[in-house]
Amino acid sequence: MRIERDGRGDFVIEPALLMRGLSISEAELQRRMRAGEITSVVEDGEGEDRSRRRLSVRCGDTVWRAVLDGQNAILSEETFDLRFRRWRAPR
């Protein structure tokens, strides 16, 4: 599956993909988007990952993340709950 980009270069993710990744219904997705409760971040790869991008979409404590190749095809994806994920500060 590929993720498209619009005329401004922004990523456009199919609602069905987000609904599955965030485990929410279409109505809930629409409601949360209107309320500004869904946020996203795009990170460009560095070094040997230079041609890749990582998209992270957050809704509450749930994060859906996808790694894209240079043609915006999904290489991998994961969903996790921030309440159970431990973050460590760099040393």
Image (tube, grey):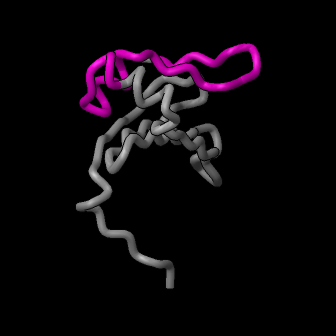
- The residue lying at 37 percent from left, 35 percent from top is 76
Give the image location of residue 23, x and y in percent: 24, 30
10 relative to 8 in the view: left or right: left
Q: Quadrant of residue 83?
A: bottom left
Front residue (pair 78, 18): 18
Tell me, yes or no, whether the highlighted magenta stretch contains residue 25: yes
Give the tally of numbered discs. 0
Identify the residue at the far bottom of this view: 91
Tell me, yes or no, whether the highlighted magenta stretch contains residue 31: no
Front residue (pair 1, 10): 10
Identify the residue at the far right of this view: 8
Above or below 83: residue 13 = above
Above or below 69: residue 65 = below
40 relative to 78 in the view: left or right: right
Above or below 84: residue 69 = above
Give the image location of residue 35, x and y in percent: 49, 32
Give the image location of residue 66, x and y in percent: 43, 36
- The residue lying at 44 percent from left, 16 percent from top is 14
- The residue lying at 55 percent from left, 24 percent from top is 72
- The residue lying at 44 percent from left, 27 percent from top is 74
Tell me the quarter of the image containing the N terminus.
top left
Magenta residue span: 2-28
Give the image location of residue 30, x and y in percent: 42, 20
